[in-house]
Image: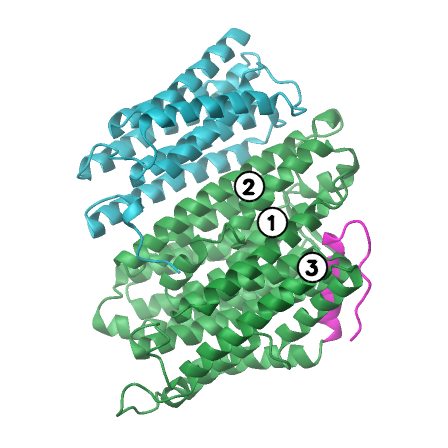
Amino acid sequence: MNFGILLWVALLLPLAGCGICLLLRRPERILSFVCFVVVCTGIVDVITAGVVFSKNTIFTCGGWFYVDALSAYHLIVMALVFCLSSIYGRHYFDKEIIEGVFTVKTARRYGALWLASLATMTLVLVSNNLGIMWVGMETTTLVTAFLICIRKDKASIEGMWKYLIICSVGIAFAFMGTLFVAASTYKLHDSFSGGILWTQLRTVAGSLDSKLMRIGFIFIFVGYGTKAGLSPMHTWLPDAHSEAPSPVSAIFSGFMLNAALYCIMRYTSLIGLVPGNTNLSRDLFLVFGTLSIIVAAAFIISQHSLKRLLAYHSVEHLGIIAIGMGMGPLGIFAALFHTLNHSICKSLGFFCAGRLGKIYGSYDMRGMTGALKLSPVWGGGLLGSLFALIGIAPFALFMSEFLIVKAAISKNLIWVLVIFIAGSCVIFAAALKHSINVVYGKPPMPDFKPQRTSFADTGIVVFSLGVLLVLGLWMPDSLNEILYRAANIIEATGTVVSIVK
Amino acid sequence: MHNTAGIIMTFLVLTNFMLLGFSRLSACIRIVALQGIAIGFLPVLLNNWNFEMHLVLFSIAIIGLKGIVFPLMLNKTLRELTTQHEVEPFIGYGISLIAGMAVFLTCMWLSSRFPFPAVMSPMVIPVAFFTIMSGLFLIISRKKALTQVLGYLVMENGIYVFGTSIAAKQPLVVELGILLDVFVAVFVMDIAIFHISREFEHTDVDKLDKLKG
């Protein structure tokens, strides 16, 4: 049976939804419709991933679409983040709809762009042609730009402009890199035809021009690294994340950064096979990763805005994932595991921050006290997600960070380990101080009554925290197998030893 | 044939220097449009005046987009803005020109050191790099949002020259996808400038400084 049709469905379903969004006449209906389409697409994504893991890789459309374990894993993460965010987004705008700020026009724009960003991110994951992958990545920048300024006030327009310019230039660099990679095939023109397909490049990686590949990989790393929010190219990230509506912040942090990193992972698996470049990706990952952790720690200490705090946490965690990527088989395994944990945890963080921000009317943590009393669900969710983010023990993020430490020790990368631990300790202390202030303490309004939360909202919080807790205590064999196979694709030179906890 | 490529490359270098030295935004838009038309001839030219169907179509698409659609779009935006000039850039025009000179020489030197596959004209690679660097320089050193968009376009032009000259021939779909992306990017930036000017009553990006820390 040909499973290629699944990929077409996953791509075209959101696009079709995009068009239908523009025809609907009520904001509530548009938001419900978005949920419906995203959940359907999510189911298709998960089925696709299931096929890949149980049978074989999907290879279709003349080799232009290709899904292997690595992209299937990311498809699952994407489906999860998008489903949660869409369900959360269904009631996020309730107040604005009543006030008449969130009009049908706004809702249509929001719904169409939301579904379009799902389609483009899917395109990034399923395309085998590295040029098309680039097209997908650049399109995510363009469609998500206007999701940031749904509100159209000064701050959000500023955040949008910075995001647009910095990421466009960054992605242009990635394009340069892609061209270099394409040029590095010039020695084998006779036997090599038809675009730059990843699968094809992988089979001939040994005879690519090593100098051009080296320059190309550096361009690609810096380019996609800009979109992934690695320091020092992260400067757009806190502005865009803090100004976007919370569901959008959640997909930014929860999946868009991962998608950019996924592109780098694809090239990592190539560059390792090119003679003379075996250590290049490791060095770049370690340098940019440690730098991200240091920068994030510096900005988290003096942060007052809750959403900016979460945004800098993203820089930190992408840094952690990057150093994991630079630490050989065990590190890559841990890094992939960390992407899942971080995505769930960070989406939850933004969900809670968004709703609490609406209750308090601002994101300034100095004024947001007593969240747990004011809204047990969102306050509790925020406490849980912040605790998980700073790496407190039973949560899954602790486990993946622990694996990274283990990988660092086994690889004898003491300087990275020292920076990682020191940065984490600083962030631990600073974020703990912030979060205790926000969660406990006395609410600023004296005559408060605890906010009611709907069943769906409670469900999102309980589900996310539950998953983080379960994965921290016990890793299912199937997930272990998935991560193991995905890591094997990135680690081209050696094989990842299965990790049994 | 070498001569024609050489003429286009020389034209690119000259227009880059003009962009670095001009302050009238409408003139800059026109120069970028001319650049777009000039590089539109490259796909046909670099394939030995090969008038294959898809090359010709691609050339027409580039010339139409970069030479006609973008300038019309940007000019329309410019008319709605309050200022028509780049006022007091971070780096003055004289210094910009000198910096451009230095960058040009560096690009010449750098590209002589890389093992690029044989290209049509020895000028192509250094000029492509110089165009990319000029675009980046415009983005960094100027204050108006519109100039940043122009810088982005110049940078794209440079990357495009680089791509057509060194990369193995790509399938048409990929190239069209890339072109479409550039189009949408400029379109989106154009709308963004409109929102900036309406909300802030200016388009000075250095005054977009509320978000920090």
Residue A312 location, x and y as percent? 48, 63
The residue beneath circle 3 is A415
Q: Which mark is residue A174?
A: 2
Magenta-drawn segment = A476-501
Q: Which of B170/A231 is in front?
A: A231
The cyan chain is B
Q: Tell me which amino acid carries mark 1.
A: Cys
Sequence-first tag of 1 and 2: 2
Q: Are marks 1 and 2 on the same chain?
A: yes
Q: Left or right? Give the position of A265 relative to B87.
A: right
Tell me residue A294's x, y (percent): 55, 60
| Residue B136 lies in the magenta-colored region | no
- Depth check, mark 3 against mark 2: the one in front is 3
Q: Which chain is green?
A: A
In this rendering, position of residue A27 left or right of residue B180: left
Helix, strand or loop at label 1? It is helix
Measuring from the top left, give residue A88's x and y in whole percent.
43, 73
Query: To which chain does the residue with label 1 belong?
Result: A
Task: Verify whether residue A485 appears in magenta.
Answer: yes
Q: Do the residues bearing badges 1 and 2 touch, measured as CB atoms within 8 Å?
A: yes
- Nearer the observer: mark 3 or 1; the answer is 3
- Mark 2 lies on a secondary structure that is helix
Q: CA distance from mark 1 to mark 2?
A: 10 Å
